[in-house]
Image (cartoon, rainbow, N blue to C red):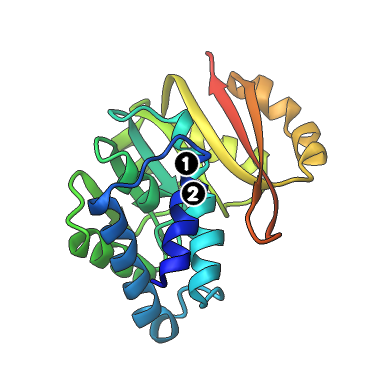
């Protein structure tokens, strides 16, 4: 990773109360190397430049850091290349993390990253969140569900509800224009016992766009 991108990652991470030590930075660099090595072979991501990966994968993922506790049991639904789960695990190593990715090749890649970065209590599983047997195995056990590219809020809530314990959170990564989705999800929010806890707005660097985290809490 180029030196200017290391500085960008450090400075942008600090906006979300993240301090990257030497170990964390080395893990991000290794993650970058693996993404660039395997991206074209496995069709992992359309974002191939180092700057794009840093901004649109690493920095974007870390925006949720301040809303997670280090000992939480967390699932990343539709994890893709491992984001946001792996960047958050790097900076919060105490998280117990499951990364759900139904694409077998991407799931294998995520587990390759987990091994290379020597992350403990983290694994990718090739399941879909709607799998009833899998839901039953984790019913009511999660503190948080992360959803970065899973679909609209009403779908995210339906998929997340069976897994979350009381007081658990859905943390959905969204574009700046979220009002219509929130309105469409109002009925599901009430039916499934969620309430809107917070909407956190942030801007990605290099004019990469405005983003919002929608944080929804399960209350009954």
- The residue under label 2 is 11
Of residues 21 and 193, the one nearer the viewer is: 21
**Residue at x 41% of width, y 68% of height:** 3
Determine the residue positioned at 31% across, 69% down. 109
Is 91 displayed left or right of 79 in the figure?
A: left
Residue holding disc 1: 14
Task: Calculate the distance from the C-alpha at mark 2 to the C-alpha at mark 1.
Answer: 5 Å
Instruction: Give the structural element (helix, strand or loop) at label 2.
Output: helix
Disc 2 + disc 1, Cβ < 8 Å: yes
Residue 171 location (% of width, % of height): 54, 36
Q: Is residue 152 visible?
A: yes
Relative depth, front residue between 181 and 138: 181
Q: Please state the total of marks drawn on the protein image.
A: 2
Q: Position of residue 181 (x, y in %)?
A: 76, 40
Q: Is residue 88 left or right of residue 118?
A: right
**Residue at (55, 60) in percent of width and height:** 55
Q: Is residue 188 above or below residue 22?
A: above
- Work out whether residue 214 or residue 140 is closer to the camera in this orientation and state it: 214
């Amino acid at each position: 990773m180029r030196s200017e991108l290391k500085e960008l990652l450090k400075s942008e991470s600090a906006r979300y109360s993240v301090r990257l030590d030497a170990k964390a930075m080395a893990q991000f660099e290794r993650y970058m190397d693996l993404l660039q090595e395997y991206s074209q072979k496995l069709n992992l991501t359309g974002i191939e430049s180092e700057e794009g990966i840093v901004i649109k994968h690493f920095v974007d993922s870390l925006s949720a850091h301040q809303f997670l506790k280090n000992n939480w049991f967390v699932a990343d639904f539709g994890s893709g290349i491992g984001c946001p789960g792996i960047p958050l695990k790097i900076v919060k190593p105490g998280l117990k993390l499951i990364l759900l990715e139904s694409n077998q090749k991407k799931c294998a890649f995520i587990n390759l990253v987990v091994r290379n970065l020597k992350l403990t209590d983290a694994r990718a599983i090739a399941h879909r969140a709607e799998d009833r047997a899998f839901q039953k195995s984790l019913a009511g056990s999660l503190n948080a569900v992360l959803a970065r590219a899973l679909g609209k809020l009403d779908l995210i809530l339906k998929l997340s509800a069976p897994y979350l314990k009381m007081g658990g959170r859905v943390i959905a990564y969204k574009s700046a224009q979220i009002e219509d989705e929130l309105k469409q999800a109002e009925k599901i929010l009430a039916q499934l016992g969620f309430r809107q806890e917070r909407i956190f707005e942030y801007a990605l660097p290099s004019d990469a766009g405005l983003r919002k985290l929608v944080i929804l809490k399960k209350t009954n």
